[in-house]
Amino acid sequence: MKKDIDESWQDRTKLVHGGTRRSAYNEVSEAIFLTQGFVYDSAAQAEARFVGAGDDEFIYARYGNPTVAMFEDRIAAIEGAEDAFATASGMAAVSGALTAMLRAGDHVVASRALFGSCLYVLEEILTRFGVEVSFVDGTDLAQWRAAMRPGTRAVFFETIANPTLEVIDIAAVAQIAHDAGATVIVDNVFATPIFSDAIAQGADVVIYSATKHIDGQGRALGGVILGSRDFIRGTVEPYMKHTGGSMSPFTAWIMLKGLETMDLRVRAQASSARALADALEGHSALSRVIYPGHHGHAQHALVTRQMGGNGGTVVSLDLAGGRRAAFAFLDALGLVLISNNLGDAKSIATHPSTTTHQRLSEERRAALGITPGLVRLSVGIEDTADIIADVTQALGTV
Ligand SMILES: *Cc1c(COP(=O)(O)O)cnc(C)c1O
């Protein structure tokens, strides 16, 4: 099979062509290899493949598959990672990356502002197996420094925290972690693969929920772990292939087709998100408009350095009237959907304190800045003026 990759291509070209493997039919669009396994020419070939499958040789779909390999090669090429392992969901990637590398007695330092399921894995699951976890305010470098100790094996954080959109300084935290000999694992969903340069900035392992911007069309769950060839093939692959969290070939095909248009979608979404943040600034129903790309964001200088000034596709609004106002606003939306995905082509509004972060106590939510009035808006690819008009009319009813 012929495999396309030209390292001189720009990212937008790699998103369309990177990693393509054409079969003997020379198809234009990537083929879906919906097969659980592969046939060997001889018993000796089967034996040899189990000893060590070559770059373009496959054994069983839980271990690898040509469509899945195309997705892994394509996302690795644009992230600047040596290798990637595709998983059944974003959470399979988060739990897989952590569990694959940790053992009883290890210590992990994590940012406290995390997606609910990431928090659950760290707090409730890893600790059951003797891993100790410390939480810090991820924006406070002194807390990261103070939390490091000799057994610290990994640090884990969301580069942009959900849903308060605080930005964590990858280069600075990586320096602290590397000085302590720890591996830096980042959940990079909110930064998107388009605006991130996390590996160049010091992350050792980058994780995406492919469910978000990579599919970007609300069709499938998926995830990916990116890192060095050593980490992916030596640590992650043996764990994932034996525990069963691999991506299905059909999902990999959806994600490949998602990657083709991801740059166009994400840039259009980010441009509308910025326009929405601008339009809402100073609105009387809002106590805060949070958008990392906005000049008013508390960490604007860091956003400029880390993401080239790009703020991603999510805007968070804090309604001055609290929960009652937030519900009235959500119920008055016409175009924007009430749901809990993000990075989707469709604009989506979420009320974190009663849905995604419901499990946390009132106090923990308050410590994270998740107020009763906070609404997370994932900006889609609809016409910018229509999005702004819908959000503005709904705020007008509050
Ligand atoms: C959605 C999400 C996940 C989990 O991804 P799934 O594909 O839903 O399993 C993890 N981290 C962040 C930041 C997310 O937004």
Image (cartoon, helix red, strand yellow):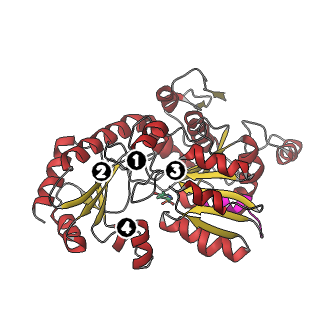
Dot 2 or dot 4: first in sequence order is: 2
Mark 2–mark 4 Cα distance, whole angstroms, equals 24 Å
Q: Residues within 10 Å of mark 2 (few under 14, many from 20)?
A: many
316, 94: nearer the viewer: 316
Dot 3 or dot 1: first in sequence order is: 1
Is residue 335 a member of the stretch shown in magenta?
A: no
341, 136: nearer the viewer: 136
- Which residue is rendered at x = 49% and y = 41% of the image? 193
Dot 4 or dot 1: first in sequence order is: 1
Position of 256 relative to 246 (above/below):
above
| Range covered by the magenta-colored residues | 94-104
Asked if the beta carbon under badge 3 is closer than 8 A to the nearest atom of ligand 1, the reply is no
Amino acid of disc 3: Thr
Question: Which marked residue is nearer to the observer: mark 3 or mark 2?
Answer: 2
Question: Which marked residue is nearer to the observer: mark 2 or mark 4?
Answer: 4
Q: Are marks 3 and 2 in contact (CB under 8 Å)?
A: no
Looking at the rendering, in which quadrant would you find the C terminus?
A: bottom left
- Which residue is rendered at x = 42% and y = 38% of the image? 262
> Is there any visible trace of residue 93 in the rendered image?
no
Identify the secondary structure beneath mark 3: helix
- Which residue is rendered at x = 17% and y = 42% of the image? 385
Question: Which marked residue is nearer to the observer: mark 3 or mark 1?
Answer: 1
Dot 3 or dot 2: first in sequence order is: 3
Count of numbered circles in the view: 4
Numbered tag placed on residue 370 in the rendering: 4
